[in-house]
Image (tube, rainbow, N blue to C red):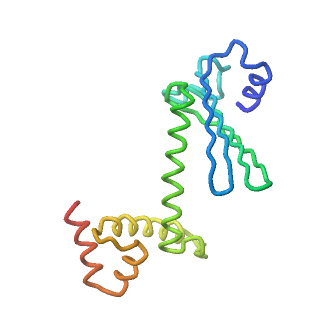
Amino acid sequence: MEAWFVQAQDQNWQGIELSYHQTVEAGHHRRETRQVWAVPVSQLPLLHRQTQWQGLTSVVMVRRRRYLWNKTTIQTQFYLSTLAADGSQHNRVIRSHWGVENSLHWVLDVTFNEDSSRVRQGYAAENLGLLRRLSVNLLKREPSHQSLKMKRYKAGMDNDFMIKILAASAAEG
């Protein structure tokens, strides 16, 4: 796919139906330009094992050019999609997915110091990750306005509070 997109760009997308969308975001001493090209599958040569991709409608290329202080990084990613070839829509969907992913990772790191975990044997890391995500969801349901970190601390120190959190989840289920 990468070679096809490079060739199509070199030929200025001549004869190819596509949707293009670009956004520029700035903040925290950085600027990011995001370019999205969405091409209907009908415009592409037959993909390897294309019949196994049920509902495949478009192929998307996203190029992120990030300027941070005096350093520039460029990252290109490709996506297969069942959505129509709409660059703006793909940009929103991809951004929202990573927003959720990044916010959960940040919460897990702040609340459980997950990045410092050195658990590596067998399935222990995977199992602990599952328990941490479950704990975050249970703590978020507790209605007080304390931070998740404080709720976690309080649940560890006060069995009645921990039982309140667990009982609330059982009542909802």
User: Number of marks in the image?
Assistant: 0
Q: Which residue is rendered at x = 48% and y = 52% of the image?
A: 100
The reply, left or right, for residue 147 in relation to residue 41 is left
Outermost residue on the left side: it is 171
| Picture quarter with the C terminus | bottom left
Residue 70 at what x, y percent from top left? 80, 54
Residue 95: x percent and y percent? 54, 44
The quadrant holding residue 81 is: top right
Which quadrant would residue 147 be assigned to in this image? Answer: bottom left
89 over 12 or under it: above or below: below
* Residue located at (69% from left, 38% from top): 63
Q: Position of residue 80 (x, y in %)?
A: 58, 33
Instruction: Looking at the picture, tell me which residue is in the foreground, 105 or 73.
Output: 73
Q: Residue at x 29, y 71 (%)?
A: 144
Q: Residue furthest top?
A: 15
Query: Position of 141 compared to 108: left or right?
Result: left
Q: For the point 54% across and 56% down, which residue is it? A: 102
Q: Quadrant of residue 36?
A: top right
In the rendered image, residue 152, in percent from the top left (x then y), is placed at 39, 77
Quarter the N terminus occupies: top right
Position of 67 relative to 38 (above/below) = below
